[in-house]
């Protein structure tokens, strides 16, 4: 069953992917991901993000540190601990060209990055006002499937039959 929600939290590990459906404020996830189009220039306070972190994200977009190209990511850490542990801006490219495939590729790229960094979970703000309209047009169920498949495939490690290198083996 697919429910329309504000965020999906996708946790990978041990071949298991847990999809946690959450509605409400962003403070319950360690890493919040906000997908953005290239045209997005302002953040909505309704995202439930700490005001300092929101200002940092706003500045990164305004000063074009983050341009919103498809698959581009920018990690922002809050000045003080509390609420969201970190914020990731995820580029989706131009809104007119955004398709389910664009969304899938961007989330897959983020999933691979998260696996490399050892950060196994992320909450995606799919209900963000600037994104919800586009996802509605693409179809929520199809969008959620694309995100879930991308996370699973992107976080898969092809290491089942690999042996540990000699310098990493423990006595």
Image (tube, rainbow, N blue to C red):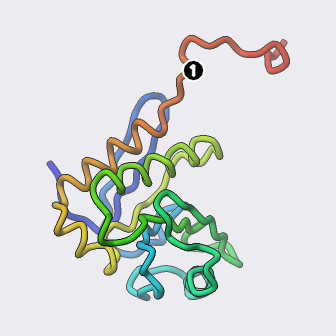
Q: Residue at x 14, y 48 (%)?
A: 1
Q: As drawn, is 49 to the left or to the right of 7?
A: right
Q: As drawn, is 169 to the left or to the right of 163?
A: right
Task: Please name whichever residue, 96 or 57, is drawn nearer the observer in this view of the structure.
Answer: 96
Q: Position of residue 75 (x, y in %)?
A: 62, 65
Task: Please name whichever residue, 117 or 137, is drawn nearer the observer in this view of the structure.
Answer: 137
Q: Residue at x 71, y 15 (%)?
A: 164
Task: Please name whichever residue, 98 or 166, is drawn nearer the observer in this view of the structure.
Answer: 98
Residue beneath disc 1 = 159
Q: Residue at x 71, y 78 (%)?
A: 79
Quadrant of the drawing holding the C terminus = top right
Q: Position of residue 50 (x, y in %)?
A: 55, 82
Q: Position of residue 66 (x, y in %)?
A: 59, 73
Q: As drawn, is 50 to the left or to the right of 165?
A: left
Q: As drawn, is 9 to the left or to the right of 155?
A: left
168 up-or-down from 119: above or below: above
Instruction: For label 1, count other residues whose C-alpha is less than 10 Å away and answer few (under 14), some (14-19) or many (20+).
Output: few
Please, what secondary structure does the residue beneath circle 1 have?
Answer: loop
17 up-or-down from 131: above or below: above
Q: Position of residue 114 (x, y in %)?
A: 57, 48
Q: Quadrant of residue 6?
A: bottom left
Q: Residue at x 53, y 28 (%)?
A: 157
């Amino acid at each position: 069953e697919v429910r329309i929600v504000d965020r999906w939290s996708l946790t990978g590990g041990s071949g298991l992917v847990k999809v946690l459906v959450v509605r409400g404020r962003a403070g319950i996830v360690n890493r919040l991901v906000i997908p953005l189009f290239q045209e997005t220039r302002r953040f909505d306070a309704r995202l439930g993000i700490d005001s300092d972190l929101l200002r940092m994200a706003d500045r990164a977009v305004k000063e074009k540190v983050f341009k919103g190209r498809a698959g581009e990511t920018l990690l922002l850490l809050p000045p003080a601990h509390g609420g969201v542990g970190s914020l990731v801006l995820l580029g989706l490219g131009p809104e007119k060209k955004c398709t389910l495939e664009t969304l899938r590729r961007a989330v897959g790229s983020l999933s691979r990055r998260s696996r490399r960094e050892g950060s196994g979970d992320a909450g995606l703000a799919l209900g963000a006002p600037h994104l919800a309209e586009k996802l509605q047009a693409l179809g929520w169920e199809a969008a959620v499937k694309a995100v879930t498949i991308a996370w699973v495939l992107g976080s898969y490690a092809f290491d089942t039959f690999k042996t540990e290198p000699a310098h990493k083996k423990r006595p």
